[in-house]
């Protein structure tokens, strides 16, 4: 067995005795990155049973299930994350107020923009109410621009998520 395989086995044994959300996520993510989707799903299922509110564990389980072709279960696992993203909008509205109160207009405007997206089209898109996939027929004017805008918005959301996690 490879050195990495031995390390993963040792990590798994250690987690049997002392479960830790971060290490359990790391194990599942490592399995996933190696293309070991059944092991990733099993590790993340165990982690989720101990930490049901952890969105990172839900995400890796959802990704593993999609890779295994278990789409219905993946959707069920990911729905709480979608609801949480909807609630995240309130964080951006509060940040908008905070930045406006501090006179930081640019950041307040950006937070407001994210709030509106999370409460409107992006949330509808995440809930499956708006199609995101490229249409089969030619795109109407502005459709490519909307997809690009959605992709950029997701990038900004990731940046804000990182900033919020560092607080």
Image (cartoon, rainbow, N blue to C red):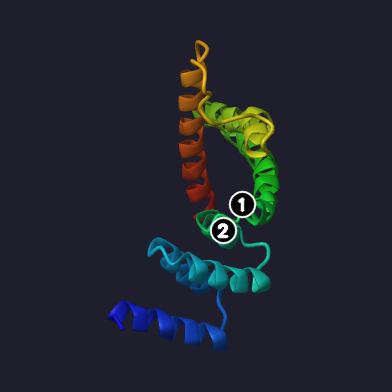
Residue 36: x and y in percent read 43, 67
Which residue is farthest left?
3
Question: The N terminus appears in which quarter of the rendering?
Answer: bottom left
Q: State the residue at coordinates (66%, 46%).
A: 82
Name the quadrant containing residue 16: bottom right
Q: State the residue at coordinates (42%, 83%).
A: 9
Residue 106: x and y in percent read 50, 27
Is residue 35 shown left or right of residue 56?
left
Residue 97: x and y in percent read 65, 34
Is residue 64 shown left or right of residue 115?
left
Residue 84: x and y in percent read 68, 48
Q: Is mark 2 on a helix, strand or loop?
A: helix
Q: Quick one: 161 or 83, which is closer to the camera?
A: 83
**Pointer 1: what residue?**
71
Tell me if residue 92 can be seen: yes
**Pointer 2: what residue?**
65
Please determine whether, in this image, residue 104 is positioned above or below residue 33: above
């Amino acid at each position: 067995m490879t050195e990495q395989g031995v390390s993963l086995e040792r990590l798994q044994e250690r987690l049997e005795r002392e479960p830790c959300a971060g290490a359990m996520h790391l194990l599942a993510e490592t399995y996933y990155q190696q293309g070991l989707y059944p092991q990733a799903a099993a590790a993340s299922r165990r982690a989720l049973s101990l930490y049901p509110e952890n969105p990172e564990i839900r995400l890796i389980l959802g990704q593993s299930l999609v890779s295994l072709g278990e789409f219905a279960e993946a959707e069920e696992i990911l729905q709480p994350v979608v609801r949480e993203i909807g609630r995240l909008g309130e964080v951006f509205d509060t940040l908008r107020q905070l930045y406006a109160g501090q006179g930081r207009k640019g950041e307040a405007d950006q937070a407001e923009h994210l709030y509106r997206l999370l409460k409107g089209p992006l949330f509808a898109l995440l809930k499956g109410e708006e199609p995101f996939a490229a249409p089969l027929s030619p795109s109407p004017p502005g459709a490519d621009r909307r997809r690009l805008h959605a992709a950029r918005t997701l990038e900004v959301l990731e940046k804000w998520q990182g900033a919020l996690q560092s607080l």
